[in-house]
Amino acid sequence: MILRAPSRRLLLAGGLALAAAPFPARATPEAARAAMRAFAGGAEPRRGRVELDIPTLVENGNAVPTVVRVDSPMTEEDHVVEIALFNERNPLPDIARFHLGPRCGEAWVSTRIRLGDTQTVHALARMKDGSVWAASAELIVTLPACIEG
Amino acid sequence: MSRALVSVPPRARRGEVVEIRAMVQHEMETGFRPLPQGGFVPRLILRRFECDYDGATVFAADLHPAISANPYIAFRLRATRSGELVFRWIDDRGAVREERAAIEVA
Amino acid sequence: MRRAALAAVALAALGAAAAAWAQSAGGDARRPGSAFMSRETQAMQRDDKANPGMLSVLEGEELWKAPAGPAGRSCASCHGADAASMDGVAARHPAFDPARGEAIDLAGRIAQCREESQGAPAPRREGRELLALTTFVAHRSRGARVSTGEDARLAPTIEAGRRLWQARLGQLNLSCAQCHDDNAGMKLGASTIPEAHPTGYPIYRLEWQDIGSLQRRIRGCLTGVRAEPFAYGAPEYVALEAFLMDRARGMEMETPGVRP
């Protein structure tokens, strides 16, 4: 993905050692869907209420800043119980599950995740009433140049 | 012993929602890293993170190999009373790393 | 198609960040590596509670206070528990070591103190202990202006570094200067070529998932052009470090940097 080739020499440098992806790609969108179905239990995940904030272009798949926010009053009667992150192209579809409750005050989590490849990431939230809400984001994972051989 | 950096506001108003951050040294060895002689580096990750405050576990996380090395987790918490927050990371072998931070609630 | 469009947009955003930095820097057109990074990586570096390099600072602080060697002396016992005596020290290393009559970089200086002042075994280059101590000491220079090169006795070392910088190296027959002077800001694959200022070292590199030295970073560029890397601690690396620090004279230290 050389957008602007500075010179012929640098084009040659396309032969530079490129970093290895953090993972061999192995999971599939089907595996991710199965994991999400298991998380949702009987519920049909609905779009909305979940906001997934993750960079569109990732500089390095080893640490991708990821924030999930869920629209919820976080009261005793109505709150987020669990937030889960899934991916489609790492060896395993699961990334993390966060357990929350009314004492969190706000349904918001921030972490850093590994992504082995350009892919789609999903965030699902289960509410106290058992309903499940979802958001997803497509992102491009690039590899750094000039790594040790 | 690994190092941990937690961030808890030293003071908060009762009922205020504050941001809590926790970062800990750990390689989070995925189990998917091939060895030159064949096979894989055995998996060793922190699989669980917990935060106790005011008599209960108020936030927890189950972690998988897709969580970055030196895991960073931030979340929100409603300040209810002065006391200590206890952070706990538990690895695949059951080893526990604990860190504490105080909050004063007025 | 959609992927390509997304990439173009995001890459343009990276360029914009660097341009904004250049504007705010007044007359100085030099830009630290952090100016070439994505907003997310910049935020990670800026925030001490999110910057994973701070874990190494913490580790170094423990080592600073821990007794070592037969006499059980800590670095703190000679240099002070608060390490204020280390303020600005990283900003003037590599420095000239009169005892040896040659330049020594910060990690080398710390290793020397560990061996000679504490009588402890020589710490390994790129080993955890030396990296943590170096990161801790260099963090005390955060915000200090680079001054390596003001000492005239370093001139021959800097000159040796400049010659290496300009030499065609490796199977790709490229010099450091061709990338970092002539093509800084351009794309190489998906990476932006930075100006190679050494102001953030040791850095936490996401690619390494760990802290690492300037020598390790340069090693990456050497293998990148398919050149045989030098042994850690080699005078060639110290010369390149001295040259890069002199080239960055007046810029602010930002250890621990975060880099992709």
Image: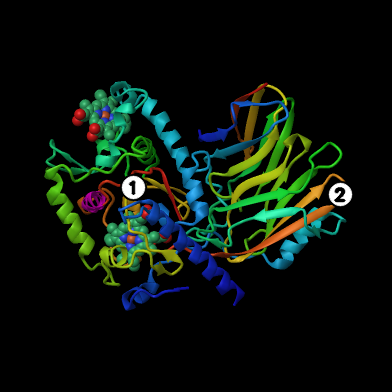
Q: Is residue A37 above or below residue B94?
A: below
How far separated are the C-alphas under marks 1 and 2? 52 Å
Name the main secondary structure of what is drawn in magenta. helix
Check disc 2 and give the amino acid type.
Gly
Q: Residue at x 20, y 60 (%)?
A: C164
Can see residue A144? yes
Say few, some or many: other residues with alpha carbon within 10 Å of mark 2 (under 14 / 14 to 19 / 20 or more).
Answer: some
Question: Mark 2 sits on what residue?
Answer: A130
Q: Nearer the viewer, mark 1 or mark 2?
A: 1
Q: In the figure, is residue A24 to the left or right of C245?
A: right
Residue C155 lies, with reference to residue C134, above or below; the image says below
- Find residue A55 and report its horizontal and vertical position in percent: 58, 58
Left or right: residue A60 versus residue C165 is right
Q: Is residue A147 visible?
A: no
Residue of label 1: C199
Point out the stretch of residues depicted in magenta. C237-247
Subunit that carries the residue with mark 2:
A
Q: Which corner quadrant of the image does residue B79 belong to?
A: top right
Q: Secondary structure at mark 2?
A: loop
Q: Foreground residue, C110 or B74?
A: B74
Q: Quadrant of the C terminus of chain A?
A: bottom left
Residue A147 lies in the magenta stretch? no
Can you give x and y, in whole percent of width and height, for residue C175 in the image?
Answer: 26, 66
In the rendered image, residue A47, in percent from the top left (x then y), is placed at 78, 60
Residue drawn 62% across the image and 61% down it:
A90
Query: Number of marks in the image?
Result: 2
Q: Is residue C245 on the magenta stretch?
A: yes
Q: Nearer the viewer, residue C254 or C169?
A: C254
The verdict on a common chain for dots 1 and 2 is: no
